[in-house]
Image: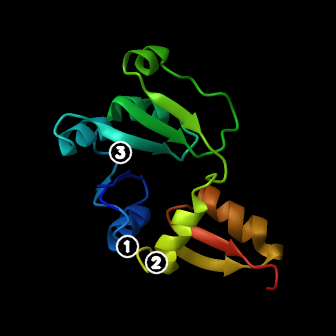
């Protein structure tokens, strides 16, 4: 779609998956690389136009304020279980547009079209399919405590 994508991810499996599937042009391991500095380097010092917060981790949100350009957009797509802390100076002085969304309102038609056209292959992201009886033990527990071994787990109630 004419955009260059950088993904910051702790999990080496997920970083490699982003590269292998061509979902990302660049992957950054935040445990060894300053994400905001790398994004500025990749954008010629400008910063990212758009960033997505998908972790519910405050340090990640803080990093995004440093990584986006003045006037950039940060979209929070994770569901936080606790209040977040926001550096209001960065929000105001950089004129950052901070927004939240649940279920990607109005984004599905474009996403479905990308999949239908073969521009996005979802199969490599599906680690496995489980039944409802295994939802907690093989679903939630895996994604919470072992996300380095799983990307997406589908639940099929017929199993």
User: Residue drawn at (66%, 43%), measured in percent from left and top?
Assistant: 79
Image location of residue 132, percent across then percent down: 81, 74
- Disc 1 from disc 2: Cα separation: 7 Å
- Residue 21's tag is 1
Q: Name the residue at the bottom extreme.
A: 159
Q: Does residue 58 appear anywhere in the picture?
A: no
**What residue is pinned by disc 2?**
121
Picture residue at 41% right of the left edge, 53% below the top: 9
Q: Which mark is residue 31?
A: 3
In the rendering, at what x and y percent does residue 105 appear? 64, 51
- Is residue 97 shown above or below 108? above
Asked if disc 1 and disc 2 are in contact, CB closer than 8 Å, the reply is yes
Residue 63 percent location from the top left of the image: 40, 33
Is 119 situated left or right of 80 in this image? left
Which is more toward the observer, 15 or 113?
113
| SS for callout 3 | loop
User: Could you say which is closer to the camera, residue 16 or residue 107?
Assistant: 107
Q: Earlier in the sequence, mark 3 or mark 1?
A: 1
Measured from the top left, where is residue 72 in percent x and y?
38, 33
- Residue at the (63%, 56%) spot, across then down: 144
């Amino acid at each position: 779609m004419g955009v260059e994508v950088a993904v910051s991810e702790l999990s080496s499996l997920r970083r490699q998956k982003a590269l292998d599937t061509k979902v990302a042009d660049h992957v950054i391991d935040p445990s060894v690389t300053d994400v905001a500095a790398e994004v500025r380097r990749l954008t010629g010092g400008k910063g990212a136009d758009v960033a997505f917060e998908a972790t519910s981790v405050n340090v990640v949100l803080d990093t995004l304020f440093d990584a986006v350009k003045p006037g950039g957009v940060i979209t929070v797509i994770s569901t936080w279980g606790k209040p977040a802390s926001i550096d209001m100076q960065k929000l105001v002085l950089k004129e950052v547009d901070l927004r939240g969304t649940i279920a990607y309102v109005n984004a599905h038609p474009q996403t479905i079209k990308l999949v239908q056209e073969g521009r996005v292959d979802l199969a490599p992201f599906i680690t496995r399919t489980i039944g409802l009886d295994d939802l907690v033990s093989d679903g939630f527990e895996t994604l919470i405590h072992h996300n380095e071994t799983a990307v997406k787990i589908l639940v099929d109630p017929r199993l």
